Amino acid sequence: MKNRRFSDAKIMGILRQAEGSSWKKALRPSQRREMAVDAVANRRVSIALACRAFQISETCYRYECKFVDENALIAAWLVRLTTNRRTWGFGLCFLYLRNVKGFKWNHKRVYRIYKELELNLRIRPRKRLKREKPDALTVPEYPNHTWSMDFMADQLADGRKFRALNVLCDFNREGLGIEVDFSLPTLRVIRSLNRIIEWRGKPQFIRVDNDPEYISGMLKLWAETLGIHMKYIQPGKPQQNAYIERYNRTVRHEWLDQNIFETIQEAQEQAKSWLWTYNNDRPNMAIGGVTPAMKLKQAA
């Protein structure tokens, strides 16, 4: 810590400012300590007298930071995370360090370093309409109880539009698959679901909206054959499919908006890479600040 130099006039001015009020309102303890150090070093004042004059304890005066090296490690981790994960705020960075990497640093200490590095996300506040709060969705008690599906749309660098089919397990918010292509008809949706079922097992329910691909007789027949119940939300009520809608927002904010794809093959490859990161590396606040993979392991 660098000692600041205070002139006699400045000290007298601060003393006059503090007159009739408490020192805490006039100056922070760290500032009073710096003034006491300056007085001892440059004005031949004893430590005891300086501490009494500036109303700090001798313990405060003699305190030396013992965590300089560890603070540098925290700062390095925070810079690395915010550089590689540009959309992560303090909450996700801290949960990643605590739950994924296993560091036991206090959140106040990490946040202080986070602020000193000026890593705070700049978020533009949005105007929100006041609406009635919908009933909370029931959280499944075990994996493969309920899956959610939904489509998203984006475009390549040359303007060609493509679609993405997102499949989510509601129990641990695990992304089970992202199917990306120019067209995703019902047969392609069924093929994607069969591929997921091969390694994950089949769900009891699949919650979907009323897109044409979901209400087709072919998908209903496929579900009946496997003993899967399709749960359709009401038209115009996306909050009834809130888990996948919140997941879509993460996909949009942390993947699609951060990349410009030249080809559909590039989008498909990056979808696999991002999905692995989401499931294994990104803490999820909705499930207690752990990753979907950790939540699944805890339930095993």
Image: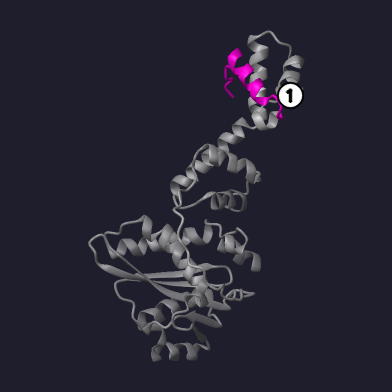
Question: Outermost residue toward the top?
Answer: 44
Q: What residue type is labelled 1?
A: Gln
Please give left or right for residue 220 compared with residue 77 in the image.
Answer: left
Which region shows up in magenta?
1-22
Quarter where residue 295 is shown: bottom right
Q: Which of the pair 188/113 is nearer the observer?
A: 113
Question: Outermost residue toward the left?
Answer: 158
User: Residue 277: image x %, image y %?
Assistant: 48, 58
User: Residue 235: image x %, image y %?
Assistant: 44, 83
Q: Quadrant of the N terminus?
A: top right
The residue pinned by badge 1 equals 55
Q: In which quarter of the image is the C terminus?
A: bottom right
User: Residue 17: image x %, image y %?
Assistant: 64, 24
Q: Which residue is drawn at 74% across and 20% down?
A: 51
Please determine whether, in this image, residue 212 is positioned above or below residue 129: below
* Disc 1 secondary structure class: loop
